Image (spheres, coloured by chain):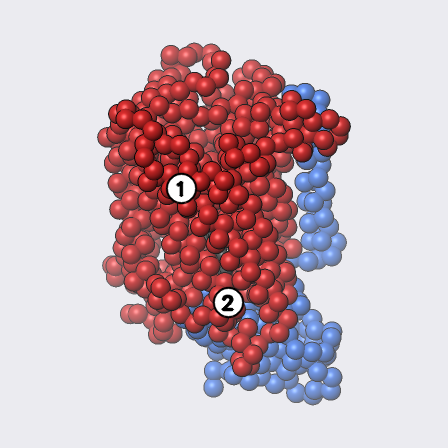
Amino acid sequence: MMENYSFRFSKSSKNLNSVLLIIPMVLLFIGVYGGFMQTLFRAGIIQSDPFVGGDYYKGLTFHGVLNAIVFTTFFAVALGNALIPYSLKKHLNSKIAWTSGILMLVGSVLAAIVILIGEATVLYTFYPPLKAHPLFYIGLTLLVVGSWVASYNWVPMYLEWRKENKGEKTPLAVVGMFTTFIIWFIASLAVAVEILFMLLPWSLGLVDEINVMLARTLFWFFGHPLVYFWLLPAYVMYYSFMPKIAGGKLYSDMAGRLVFMMFILFSIPVGTHHQYMDPAIGSQWKLLHGIFTFAVALPSLITAFTLAASLEHAGRKRGGKGLFGWMWKLPYFDKEKWFFPYLILGLIIFIFGGIGGIINASYQMNTVIHNTAWVPGHFHLTVAGPVLLAFLGGSLYLIGQFMNKGIKFKGWAMISPYVYTIGLFIMSYGLKIGGLKGMPRRTNTGASYANPDSILYQPDWIFYIDLSVIGGSIMFVGIIMYLVSFFGTVFAKSESSEEGALVTFPISEPLHDEPSTWLRNFKPFIIIAIILIVLSYAPVIYDVIQNTYGGSLPYSPNSPVPLR
Amino acid sequence: MDKSEKLALTLSGMLLVIFFGAIMYASVAQNIEVPTCITDMEPFATDTLFQTGPDTYELQMVSRMWAFQPSTVRLPVGSTVDLYVTSQDIIHGFKIDRKNVNLMAIPGAINYMRVTFNEPGEYLYACHEFCGAAHHTMAGRFIIEEGIDEPEVEGDAL
Ligand code: HEM
Ligand SMILES: [Cu+2]
Ligand SMILES: [Cu+2]
């Protein structure tokens, strides 16, 4: 019944969605370029950026901000702007949608400019008392507020749909998108408080001092759910697109709904697991956040089962026999199904990303890896793996649909994720093992630890630093191959001359479809989530306020003397 | 939910419970802990090292852009150190190579961990949080040797 259903987007929303895909793709390219340069810096091959200028840490700042904050936020909004109207058969209010898009664009461009001119070398976590230019904080605020506006736009559409379709289950993709933005909204309230009431007035000089631990704790209230904001749009595509593209059905609709609701419950009261090694927070509260972190691993384990079962179903329908025979029947190298590798490779990478995540979350075990190169090794296997690949595949699919264009260079598009994945495994292996040998993260090793002339020279680390150069170069090539296909498609001749865009998504049908009435309403889950947040964060904030003294003046990264 | 799904869910839950049990075991039975609140310590702005018992020392470590003070600590084999770490300016990170000590050095707060050195050798501590332009040069080392009578430090505030 869902078979090949299409929905016509208005000209205005079609243009907006195209802009929301193309601009961040340019910013992603700058960010990924920065990543590639970092690998060269770390090995001592370059000492300053040959094109953009500036040192390692400026590059690291735009790499983190553009890739992990800007690109991801834009894609999540574009996916919602596409899937929600499509699944609910309702039109976007394009005035509100454009307002949101413009806020996000202005904010991102502002932040990018101050970073690139070297006025905001504070990395994507912007911990005080390092101070950035006020426009950096303002830019990030506009980006976040813009994304809020986008999601408010979907609420009336959803409420209206529910009124008209009493007793029907909300389409799973819509549940997933709302879950994403409910988590995002609650989480970003904390960073909004941090920016608007602490960082911005302090960076403008209206207040002198800042409580560093408090700012840091508010950041991580936001920082962990941020990773689910990245991950969940990928989950939406795994659940709703992948089984259909593979030629099968979603094994269980209820599993999908349960997973999303569990994310609402447990995504937020876990942020202190990033602060296991911090002072001024009682270890019992750290342990509590650790327990909730294990709870939030459960929906990902359920997802692993459900998606594997869906793929098995597809493989068997395609003639796969035996216990594992179905695995070889999936469309890994089918140019017409170029989207499939983006999703399946992401899932394979996520096996390692997930294991790494559980290690990091394991309380005392965090001592071994905290802030070592292991950590970027780990999260390139999550955000720069499954999330990036799903978002790249999704961007290419959406741009083809919204611009009425056939995908160009399909072969390149199909091979690119394989190339990228090979590079990623090599780079992450280098970073992770280097980290276990003590190599710190966020560190320009090329200028000290990897330099044979330095008293700090660490010969043990060199092999792993070199691995990350090799892996990083291969990843960069993979991204270039992708961009050839993406921009080839953008600049290709349109295949139709119509005004709007007739859009189709590969939405999977469920194999097991249960009523799951108790999973139909967000409200009880949001209420329990808020209770868990209060219970887990009240003691942490109390500890931080009780056990810190003095305030901090702002510093520039270039001088040990405070700025005022 | 069908049977296989229920089984997968149960096994996943059990796996997580086992992992969690391992954490509790390490915490309660082996007493391996993460840093907690320190309430009985006056804020300090200069580094000090003093002996508190036959093989025990207290070290107050100050981190600043871009050096640890002290930057070299020489101690006899078998020393146990009560290590307090803070920052004078911005956030730094302190991890002793091959030891289970990993502490954020944060202005306005004191971090603590106890460490014992039973093997002679050099133990690097490299700053692992971005602290500005020369972050990659911020490091120090413990030198653990047989037959040291007096502990020594280098690179302190004076
Ligand atoms: C060609 C592709 C890429 C390469 C070669 C690359 C390489 C690197 C390297 C070497 C680091 C620095 C490690 C350190 O000093 O701690 C890093 C950090 C990081 N990367 Fe990537 N990366 C790539 C793509 C991505 C993508 C696509 C994303 C996100 C979607 C991403 C997100 C991050 C983040 C968030 C950091 C941490 C920044 C920080 O610690 O402040 N990277 N990357
Ligand atoms: Cu986290
Ligand atoms: Cu540092």
Between A408 and B138, the one lying in front of the other is A408
Q: Residues within 10 Å of mark 2 (few under 14, many from 20)?
A: many
Three-letter amino acid code at the position of disc 2: Arg
User: Is residue A451 at least partly visible in the picture?
Assistant: yes
User: The C terminus of chain A is located in which quarter?
Assistant: bottom left
Three-letter amino acid code at the position of disc 1: Phe
Residue drawn at point x = 38 percent, y = 57 percent? A62
Identify the residue under disc 2.
A42
Residue under mark 2: which chain is it in? A
The image quadrant that residue B55 belongs to is bottom right
Q: Residue A407, which numbered label?
A: none
Q: What separation in Å lies between label 2 and label 1 (alpha carbons)?
A: 30 Å
Image coordinates of residue A17 in percent, x first then y, are 33, 34
Q: Is residue A11 left or right of residue B94?
A: left
Label 2 within 8 A of ligand 1 by Cβ: yes
Q: How many marks?
A: 2
Identify the secondary structure beneath mark 2: helix
Image coordinates of residue B86 in percent, x first then y, are 50, 69
Identify the residue under disc 1.
A486
Q: Is residue A117 left or right of residue A1?
A: left
Mark closest to the chain's N terminus, 2 or 1:
2
Instruction: Please tell me whether mark 2 or mark 1 is closer to you in this view.
Output: 1
Q: Is residue B152 left or right of residue A402?
A: right
